[in-house]
Every structure is written in structure tokens, then in C-alpha cells.
Image (cartoon, rainbow, N blue to C red):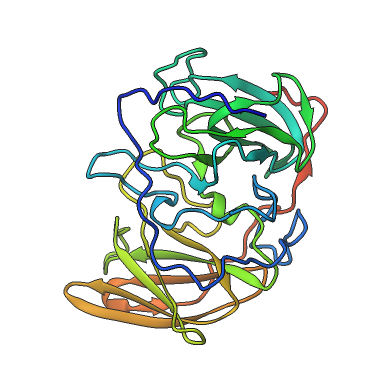
Amino acid sequence: MEALVSPSPEPFQFSLPTPGAEPVTNWRPPLYPVPWAISPYDHFFFARPFAADQTNWPIADYRYGGVFFGRDIVHTGVDIPSPEGTPIMAAGPGTVVWVDWGLFRETPGDQTDPYGLAVAIRHDFGYNDQQLYTIYAHMSMANVLVGQHVETGEIIGFVGSTGATTGPHVHFEVRFPRNSFFFTYNPELWIVPPQGWGVLAGRVMDSKNRLLNSVEVTVRSEQTDRSFITRTYGDGGAVNPDPYYQENLVLGDLPAGIYKVTLRFEDKIRQTWVEIFPGQISYFTFAGDDGFSTDRPSAPTLEFLPQALPSTATPQP
């Protein structure tokens, strides 16, 4: 199907940076089936929005919580690059509640909206009795209608570069309990990892337990010597930590193994080692002069498995 391309409007542009060093091969193992939650701490409820034979991992420089070009624009999702016209798939079963321009500003038909042509899905399951949504932005063409029910893996549209972007990709978000820009959470804690791979979450603070924003953190594999560089979340009201982890850093798609975590605090290099486990989230905290800890937060009191919403629940757009 030929993709329809719309011009990129202002007010700002999200340029896709040149990616860093990639592995010799881009091959990833098959994904775990969803939902995948082998411990009460993890909630991998969603599949990737692309087929397994396509690039389906986020751009390293455009993760959740990043701040672009020194402006106070905090990234509320992850960007996954793919060629123009690549099919975009539903990350989970649900009902389509938005197919239009204007999702960022919540103004239907606004063709100056930075999200371009976007689709939003209200999912059939919730989290802690709250409604879950996923967002797919910058499409060239949509393949669904508002009110249509879709299943996991069903094609809902095609990759484009509509809205504020200079390269074809899908901007993917997880939202709850409202379908609003200010109710987003880090998708890398919700989309299932490849088999044998895991996710690292961290909470980086100063000596008074205040969160540190935009701190560069290097994660290096002791097995392969490959390094991954990420940053803690920027300072922005649209970024929300996971209710359990309370993180300000997430690095997904890490092969299981031992990794050295390095950051700079008060002009000194600080480091520790963490182990990534298959299909799970590993966790660390850094608290300034108190150093690192890999102790998890207190046992959660929430139910972390997806639950069907009560039949009396009032759906939200």
C-alpha cells in the first residue's frame, strides 16, 4: 500500500540522531509471550508495535524522559525507527479511541499537532483497576476506525513522518489511567523483552535522596565489553515513575549477564555491578555519598497482573 506523506509542521522538530555503535548483527531473539510477569515486580503486558523481522527496539538517544536540544520538551514515549510504510501493529487487545491528528494537544483535526496522524487504543485489561492505553504517533496512514476492536498484532496503520519529526518512525507511549499527555509511563517497563534478555531500572539521587536529572550513565557488559549509554529522566511534569520502582532511568533489551554501571557524581566516578536476568527487571539505586544498592523497594501491595475491568466501568476516550 502506498503511504501518504504529510509535510512536517512546526512548532518543533524531533531529529533522529545518528545511532551509536550497534552489534555486529541486529538479530534479536523471539519475544516472550504476553502478558509476561514471572515476578510480582514486573508487568510486561504489551508486545512490540512491529513484526519480529523488523527493527523493533527504541532509538537509544530518544528514550522516555529525554530532553531534546536544551528545550523543556520531555519525551513521553520511545521512538522505534522503521522504513516508511512499515505496518504498525497493536501492542495488545483493545478498542480504538482515537484516529486523527491533534492527539498531543487533544484537538481533533489539528494538522499542526506534533504527533501527526496518531492512533490510541484503550485496552481490554487494566493495571491496579485503572485503564491502560497505548499511543502510536507519526503514521503515514491509519488502518482502523474509532470504535473498532483490535487484537494483539493486528495492523492499525503504517509508519510515516507526519507531525514534528524528520525521519520515519513510530512514537510509542503507555498511558494510565487517562488518555492524556501527562499520564505516561516508561514503555520499556511494559513491552516484553526478547527471550533471554532483560531490563535495567534505576533510581539515581544525591546524598539527600533528591532525584538527579539528565545524568549520563554507562552500562557495560562484562561478557562482551559492549557499552550502552543512557541518561536519567529530565525535569518535566509529563514524566511519571513506575508505581513500584519509582525509577528515573530505564535501559531495556539487555542480554542476560553481568554489567558494570558507571556514573559521575561530584566530579568522581562511581560504579557498581548488576546482573540482568532473563525476562525480568533488575534494579539499583544510587544515593550520592551513600553509594549504590541493589535492594528492591518494599514488597508491592498492588496486583501486577492484568485484570479485566469491571463491567460497570465507564470507558474514557
As drawn, the residue found furthest toward the right would be: 311
For residue 158, which quarter of the picture? top right
Report x, y in % for residue 35: 75, 54
Which quadrant of the figure contains the C terminus? Answer: top right
Q: Residue at x 66, y 57 (%)?
A: 192
Report x, y in % for residue 70: 22, 44
As drawn, the residue found furthest toward the top would be: 109
Decide which of 279, 176 is in the foreground and name it: 279
Decide which of 7, 220 is in the foreground and name it: 7
Q: How many marks?
A: 0
Q: Residue at x 68, y 67 (%)?
A: 29
As drawn, the residue found furthest toward the bottom would be: 223
**Relative vertical location of residue 265 with respect to residue 234 in this rendering, above or below:** below
Q: Viewed as shown, does residue 300 lie left or right of 145?
A: left
Decide which of 162, 269 is in the foreground and name it: 162
As drawn, the residue found furthest toward the front would be: 2
**Relative vertical location of residue 221 with respect to residue 296 in this rendering, above or below:** below
Report x, y in % for residue 203: 41, 64
Q: Residue at x 37, y 53 (%)?
A: 233
Q: Viewed as shown, does residue 91 lie left or right of 297?
A: right
For residue 301, which quarter of the picture? bottom right
**Relative vertical location of residue 229 with respect to residue 211 in this rendering, above or below:** below
Decide which of 186, 170 is in the foreground and name it: 170
- In this view of the protein, can residue 72 be seen by the observer? yes
Report x, y in % for residue 270: 29, 79
Which quadrant of the figure contains the N terminus? Answer: top right
